[in-house]
Amino acid sequence: MTVPDWAGPDSRVWLGVPLIHLERLAGLLIIETPRSPRTLNWEDFDLLRTVGRQAASYLAEQASEAALMEARKFEEFNRRFAFIMHDIKNLVSQLSLVARNAERHADNPEFQRDMMLTIKSSVDKMNDLLARLKQHNIQRSDSEAVDLAALLERMVAAKAHAYPGLSLDANGAARVRGHEAKLEQVFGHLIQNAIEASRDGEAIQVALRNGGDAARVEVMDSGVGMSEEFIRNELFTPFRSTKPGASASAYEAREIVKGYGGRIEVQSREGEGLCLRLYCRSLCRRLRPDG
């Protein structure tokens, strides 16, 4: 091998040991001239060869670790962006529906009021999405006490304008530990998927039950349903869906709920609809009628 230009005029350079890893040169180990002159023998060459290979393996491992960390950062960003794309799709669908209805009901004061609330809510959600993209490595505080009954009532009321078959049955109050925006994202995905899987006019019921230690939310529809094989092997796999196009909503919803110590159960048959049960740890027992 050719001696580097910087090593030629340096009188301290005595030996250059090539660092070979998988038949490729990973670097060059420079050894200074010893204080006492000596002649190298075969044992010295074997030792230098072993040291060179060991050092080369360490360099290769360090480079692989750095590449893996970078790949994980890109994977995390791409996964998060895929989830955000799903949220954007839902917002676009909601705004498109408002735009279509505006052509017929623009003069209706009640519709104007609902339209302004929908637009304001969509803007707030899009700002939240931008914040999540900018701060994807920052852990957000998830220590809020969320009123599930109020959250579900607000969400169902917002979507019932476009889908009258959607209803809420809330039996008592329930507060859970979590982040309201993330829980809204979870229920938004589940309710929207139920709407997309149902035919116009079919009933979709959202039910809230507080069992004391756990609050249970059910989303039930009479749509196309899912096979047991799909539920077992593909439902919670990212970018798998019974609908055209890739979807990450079920996987994302499960990961968020698991982060709060909860779980999601699925009951369905093809052609017979779907029942999703979501369990979250409750912060209070069922309120008595007297409060």
Image (cartoon, rainbow, N blue to C red):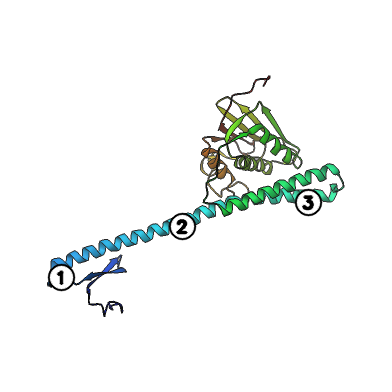
Q: Residue furthest right?
A: 107
Say which label, 3 or 1, has the lower sequence index. 1
Please count the marks in the image.
Answer: 3
Horizontally, is 186 left or right of 204 in the view?
Answer: left
**Foreground: disc 1 or disc 2:** 1
Say which label, 3 or 2, has the lower sequence index. 2
Q: Is residue 169 visible?
A: yes
x%, y% of residue 16?
24, 72
Tell me: residue 284, above or below residue 17: above
Q: Secondary structure at mark 1?
A: loop
Q: Badge 1, how many Cα within 10 Å: few under 14, some, many 20+?
A: few
**Foreground: disc 3 or disc 1:** 1
User: Which residue, given by chain and number where applicable, does mark 3 sit on?
Assistant: 99
| Circle 3: residue type | Ala
CA separation, marks 3 and 1?
85 Å
Q: Badge 2, how many Cα within 10 Å: few under 14, some, many 20+?
A: few
Tell me: residue 10, above or below residue 86: below
Q: Is residue 246 visible?
A: no
User: Which residue, given by chain and number where applicable, does mark 1 sit on?
Assistant: 35
Res. 71 mark? 2
Q: Residue furthest front?
A: 35
**What residue is shown at x 51% (from left), y 52% (from top)?**
76
| Circle 1: residue type | Arg
| Circle 2: residue type | Ala
Quadrant of residue 191 within the rendered picture: top right
Horizontally, is 68 left or right of 262 in the view?
Answer: left
Tell me: residue 197, above or below residue 216: below
